[in-house]
Image: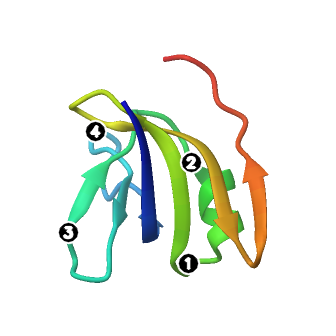
Amino acid sequence: FLCVLEGVIPIPAEKSTAPWVVRDRQGKALPLVPRDHWQLLAISGGHPIDLVGQWDRRSILPFGVYADHRYTLLHTQTP
């Protein structure tokens, strides 16, 4: 399902087996697909962003980010 998340912050995995997550202002988190998301973190600068992606009921595959009044298409590959 296509989804838009407003005001989320990408958080790197704490362990190599844990997924990256996006966390909202209330502290609730959703997992991202298993892979590195350094581009997403770099664009956000650790600040809230708006994220467009695909939710498969387990994790989100990010497609693009709206930050600093600009939309950036992310380089994604199918897992």
Q: Residue at x 32, y 44 (%)?
A: 19
Position in image of residue 42 (x %, y %):
69, 65
**Residue kind at label 1, given as amino acid type:** Gly
Among the two numbered marks 2 and 4 on one chain, the one whose residue lies closer to the N terminus: 4
3 vs 4, front mark: 3
Among the two numbered marks 3 and 1 on one chain, the one whose residue lies closer to the N terminus: 3
- Name the residue tied to disc 1: 46
Q: Secondary structure at mark 3?
A: loop
- Name the residue tied to disc 4: 17
Among the two numbered marks 3 and 4 on one chain, the one whose residue lies closer to the N terminus: 4
- Rounded to the nearest whole Å, what is the CA distance between mark 2 and mark 1? 12 Å
Q: Which mark is residue 28?
A: 3
Q: Secondary structure at mark 4?
A: loop
Among the two numbered marks 2 and 3 on one chain, the one whose residue lies closer to the N terminus: 3
Quadrant position of the N terminus in the picture: top left
Looking at the image, which is closer to me, 56 or 2?
A: 2
4 vs 1, front mark: 1
> Image quadrant of residue 47?
bottom right
Q: Is residue 74 above or below residue 65?
A: above
- Rounded to the nearest whole Å, what is the CA distance between mark 4 and mark 1? 22 Å
Q: Residue at x 30, y 27 (%)?
A: 56
